[in-house]
Amino acid sequence: MTMEPSNELLSIPTEFIEISGCFVRIEAADASGIALQRGHPHRPPARFNRCGEDALYLSPDAESAHVAIGGDVTCNDSPRVLARYKVARCKLVDLRSKNAAKLYELARCPWRTALESGEDPPSWTAADIVRESGAVGLIDPSRRRAKLWHVTLFRWNEPRAPKVSLEGPPEQFAVTPGYR
């Protein structure tokens, strides 16, 4: 499905939310900490980033992270760990806000379907608008479970962006395929 944004949609959100603290992500045990690398040319495409484009996907707790990744794992995947990241204070566009409803409409479209059809997912347009707003990232409500949310940072560990660091050793984490 291709969604062409209108000029009205391209208006930059004016409502930001400030976050800081400990966030988590579930990652492959043999690749723990790689998420912090910026400018990695082989970073795979995802909901808010093209191949090679910086994006750091985090969640406020293990349950939210498990829900986020549950649909993307299989029984044959390598072992996973839960890594904790300390994120310094930063301002994000909150896609849960009524002011960001049009951006969320783009963000919530099935990105894999568009990519498999050879199209740019509408969520990439939403991410581009957020990047252009000067925000370092966004808060994205879970599409799998109400009240859960996730953080996506587009910039970190650079001037005018939050410092993000791995906090302690990652812990083994059993991910249930299809977990919702």
Image: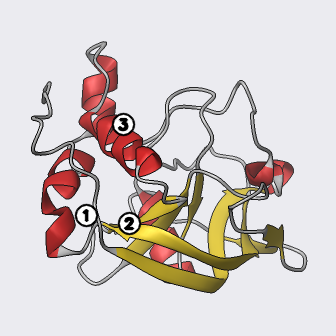
- Camera-near label (2 vs 1) is 2
Location of residue 110 in the rendering, given as x and y in whole percent from the top left corner: 24, 41
The residue where tag 3 is placed is: 124
Q: Is residue 149 above or below residue 76?
A: below
In the image, taking residue 74 as reference, residue 86 lies left or right, namely right
Q: Residue at x 21, y 57 (%)?
A: 104
Amino acid type of the residue tagged 2 in the rendering: Val
Amino acid type of the residue tagged 1 in the rendering: Arg
The residue where tag 1 is placed is: 143
Q: Quadrant of the C terminus?
A: bottom left
In the image, taking residue 151 as reference, residue 147 lies left or right, namely left
User: Circle 1: is it few (<14), some (14-19), or many (20+) Cα within 10 Å?
Assistant: few
Snapshot quadrant of residue 7: top left
- Camera-near label (3 vs 2) is 2
User: Could you say which is closer to the camera, residue 11 or residue 30?
Assistant: 11
Q: Residue at x 49, y 55 (%)?
A: 134
CA gap, disc 3 and disc 1: 17 Å
Tally the marks.
3
Location of residue 92 in the rendering, given as x and y in whole percent from the top left corner: 46, 68
Amino acid type of the residue tagged 3 in the rendering: Trp
